[in-house]
Amino acid sequence: DQQVKQNSPSLSVQEGRISILNCDYTNSMFDYFLWYKKYPAEGPTFLISISSIKDKNEDGRFTVFLNKSAKHLSLHIVPSQPGDSAVYFCAASAADTGNQFYFGTGTSLTVIP
Amino acid sequence: DAGVIQSPRHEVTEMGQEVTLRCKPISGHNSLFWYRQTMMRGLELLIYFNNNVPIDDSGMPEDRFSAKMPNASFSTLKIQPSEPRDSAVYFCASSLDSASNQPQHFGDGTRLSIL
């Protein structure tokens, strides 16, 4: 049973525009959320995270928003660049299950030059 | 600094054969994870270790799968006997400790094909 869901398998965006990737979760005990970026033939790399005590975390062009009441988080990339084309995974963990992460199935982002 | 190192990068073998995947975590990291990536289920956690001790192996699909971590710098995932449905990309990851807010760092994976 998927506790973390990414319902959009793919997304295409024009270069310079905003990319918004979405993620939903079902477990209200999750208190730490991350986004990973994955290029073909490479492992996922950590991108940005947010704790449940916050509703926003920003790092350069990347911002993650957390809506706990809706059990929803999103990753905004502004402005989008062709090098951002990759698969993005969201993940979540709960303090009572330690460092076990639950991953979504990923969203493939294509930024069109 | 070296990241997580996995070997081999690719493995093609016939069903029924034993397959061993290897992982060297980042030095100083105390937690190690094995994942399997499939199109349908994304990244599935198979097993993880804290301080070389298996903590949760509930994700291991069958008794054909086993994992060991004999020391802090090496882990193996073994499939015996292998079946075509085991074909997937297997990732190893490590994190600094067992806290829930520590990012995991992934290797580049082993692409396994069972014919």
Image: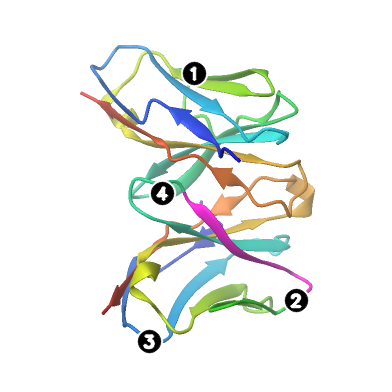
The part of the chain drawn in magenta is A44-54
Task: Tell me the element at label 4.
Answer: loop
Residue B63 badge: 1
> What is the x, y in percent for residue A33?
64, 63
Q: Are marks 3 and 4 on the same chain?
A: no
Label 2 to label 3: alpha-carbon separation:
27 Å
Q: B107 or A64, which lies in front?
A: B107
Task: Tell me the element at label 1.
Answer: loop
Q: Was residue A63 drawn as part of the magenta stretch in this picture?
A: no
Label 3 to label 4: alpha-carbon separation:
32 Å
The residue type indicated by label 3 comes to Gly
> What is the x, y in percent for residue B85?
30, 30
Q: A29 or B105, which lies in front?
A: B105
Main SS, magenta region, reads strand
Q: Residue at x 75, y 76 (%)?
A: A54
Q: Which residue is mark 2?
A: A54
> In the rendered image of this protein, does residue B88 appear above or below residue A34?
above
Q: Which residue is mark 4?
A: B41
The residue type indicated by label 2 comes to Lys
Question: Is residue B109 at all visible to an observer of this figure?
Answer: yes
> What is the x, y in percent for residue B15?
26, 17
Q: Which residue is mark 3?
A: A16
Residue A22 badge: none
Q: Horizontal placement of A92 versus A31: left or right? A: left
Q: Residue at x 31, y 32 (%)?
A: B87
> In the rendered image of this protein, does residue A77 appear above or below residue A85?
below
Q: Are marks 4 and 1 on the same chain?
A: yes
- Chain of the residue under the numbered disc 1 shown in the image: B
